Amino acid sequence: MRVFFRDSILLIIVAAVALEGISLFQYYAAKKGLQKEASLRAKNQLEISKLKICDIINQTETAVFNSDWIAEWSLSHPDSIAAVTRRVVHDNEIIVGSTIAVKPGTIKGKGLYAPYSFRAQSSEVINQTSLATDEYNYPESEWFKMPLNLNSGYWSEPYVDVGGGEILMTTFSIPLHNSKEEPVAVLTADISLDWLTSILDNSRVYPHSRSLIYSRSGKVLGEVDDDDDDDNTEEGGNSFSLFSGISTEVEMDIMGQHWFLYIAPIEKTGWSMFIFIPEEDIFAGIRKVTLISRLLGVLGLLMIILILNITAVRQRRVRKLEEKKDKMENELRIGHAIQMSMLPKTFPPFPERKDIDMSASIVTAKEVGGDMYDFYIRDEKLFFCIGDVSGKGVPASLVMAVTRSLFRNVSAHESSPARIVMDMNDSMADINENNMFVTFFCGVLDLATGQVKYCNAGHNPPILLTTNIKPLDVEPNLPLGIMTGMQFTEQEFDMCFDDAMFLYTDGLTEAENKNKELFGEERMMKALRGRNSAAGKLHDMEDAVASYVGSAEQSDDLTMMFIHYTNEEIAGSKKRRLTLHNDIQQISLLEDFVNGIAKEAGFSASVASGINLALEEAATNVIMYAYPKGIDGICTIDAVIRPGSVEFIISDTGQPFDPTSVPPADTTLGVEERKIGGLGILMVQTIMDEVKYRYEDGKNILSMTKTIK
């Protein structure tokens, strides 16, 4: 009995220490997880808000840079200056005012000269006034001096434009040059800062978090805070100088409360956006859970004492071992079910579509594994991936779950496989405390054209099934999670009708029989011969592996995916490409290119001439205006010849510009009455049967289709 009592007391003490240790471990693990979540939410919100602000900044800069040539022309025609500023305001809703302010003496007979056009706050009426007054004295204004001194675009500090717009605004101005390339004037665009309040109001990530923006000189541009205490606001304002040049995440104490501060610089303007989150908001829930956990721990101890009083020591130990074993097996079964539920498992996945047939399968070597695959369709593009985590069991399954979640989150707003892989790699490397890595292959199939863009991260090359069976040419790159900042190569190829792609993990080629001999690539290639449905091909491969392995124990996870491209609309289509540099002399290359396409498509000479004229107009616009002076830019022209039509796709990476948004010229008016611009796009739309524009992956893409009659 003494032995039983002694062992019981010892067991109770051990259980109490273990429960307390588990409780503390859970508390700190949960606290760390919540802090990471808060950091991720704040940084994501900062990025979203930053993108909104940068969008307005970029729109303003684009509007100004697109008007610099007409503004410089107007310096030689002073009577047109006011009309130019009025046009800048009229064509851009975000711009509330604009002026062309010249150096004194630049225009003969005039000293100070700065006609100013601005949109009235209570209406859409555009008014005009002059800033050339002694009271305003624009030559001493920051927005006038700085662009002339720097000879480049400049964002001013926020200010209330007394005598001009009469609102809180910031100004973007660029220098204008005379015929001698001397900066003699500036072209400006004023934007109101009222929209900052709306952006900050939408950036609240926790109930009591605060958001504000500082200018480069430390001025508060906007702030959202439920607390009306002026002392708190002043404390935040004075503390700005403490954070200049620091990292994007800081802990600090303000007015006796602990806060987490997250910072994001806004390039070009010199502004910085801050989000303050009180510690109480982040960890409020975990304290309540910890208390309940401790109470449950005490209850558990009481239950152990009760069990010890009615059960012999040896019987209790056997029972506990059995219970633990059953619990572990049950948890592994649940874990396997949860893991499999994360992956697409309904096949065929897109029964309503006629352009794709695919299937996938995964067989884990243990209850849970580290292989994964995923796919879905967004914007008529198939996003797909396959991966293999180093290691096995529960740790590998957790990394697999993170990998799949990151793929879904990143690819939801990103279409470039290389950028998807880079973002996933950086995120995984930041949290890779166990030095596990993932071999990964990511692809994006344009279901309309058959174009496949892909990026490989140390994974087995997929197998292409075209007129023959061969591995896809891939850059190996490093697996995911090794280190941040890695660059990954993006590649592409075109799939034709009835082409297919087979993706797999090394559990297929390294499957072993009883003699430890590998299944190998040769047997895999043999099993891929012949035509079958996607599900049928995987079934054939599984039968081949099972027949070879026999009764040998499975040594690694086995994952496969088969993609069969069945878009009959591109059957018989042909593609041609012409690449031009932004040199107007290269326009002469268009004629031979168009004539060759016209001959293949069966166009007449007159139709070919019209197509050449339309392409020349569009390509000239890219060459002349898409890229800044002195920058070697590329204009790519792809021709896709299909039964019944030819599509010309012009793409460039220059400044975003939608030519179809330019109002066509009114040809019923006289030359003097007609507004400048619009004739080119009118001609293109008249010649071609369909003209579309989109901006995608950093490219201007103009699609022009001509029907074969």
Image: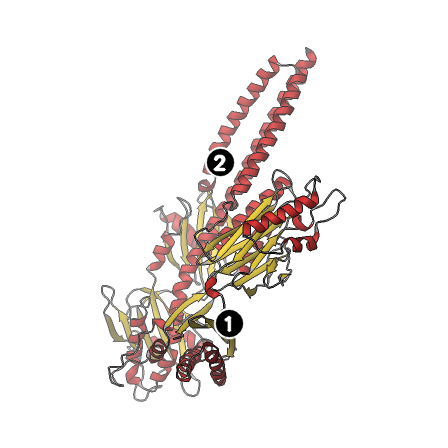
Farthest-out residue, top: 1
Give 514 or 472, whichever is nearer the viewer: 514
Looking at the image, residue 263 lies above or below residue 690: above
- Structural distance between the alpha carbons of marks 1 and 2: 60 Å
Total labels: the figure holds 2
> Looking at this view, is 175 or 474 the one in front?
474
Label 2 neighbour load within 10 Å: few <14, some 14-19, many 20+: some
Indicate the position of residue 541 as horizontal and vertical percent values. 62, 49
Does dot 1 land on a helix, a strand or a loop? strand
Q: Secondary structure at mark 2?
A: helix
Residue 301, by quadrant, is top right
Q: Amino acid at mark 2?
A: Ile
In this rendering, position of residue 422 left or right of residue 112 = right
Q: Residue at the bottom extreme? A: 108
Q: Return the disc, 1 or 2, that comes first in the chain's sequence.
A: 2
Q: Which residue does the numbered mark 2 point to in the structure image?
A: 286
As drawn, the label of residue 519 is: none
Q: Position of residue 671 (x, y in %)?
A: 27, 86
Query: What residue is disc 1 on?
Result: 575
Left or right: where does residue 175 sit relative to residue 126? right
| Res 625 quadrant in image | bottom left
Q: Amino acid at mark 1?
A: Lys
Residue 143 seen in the figure: no
Q: On the rendered image, what quadrant is the C terminus found in? A: bottom left
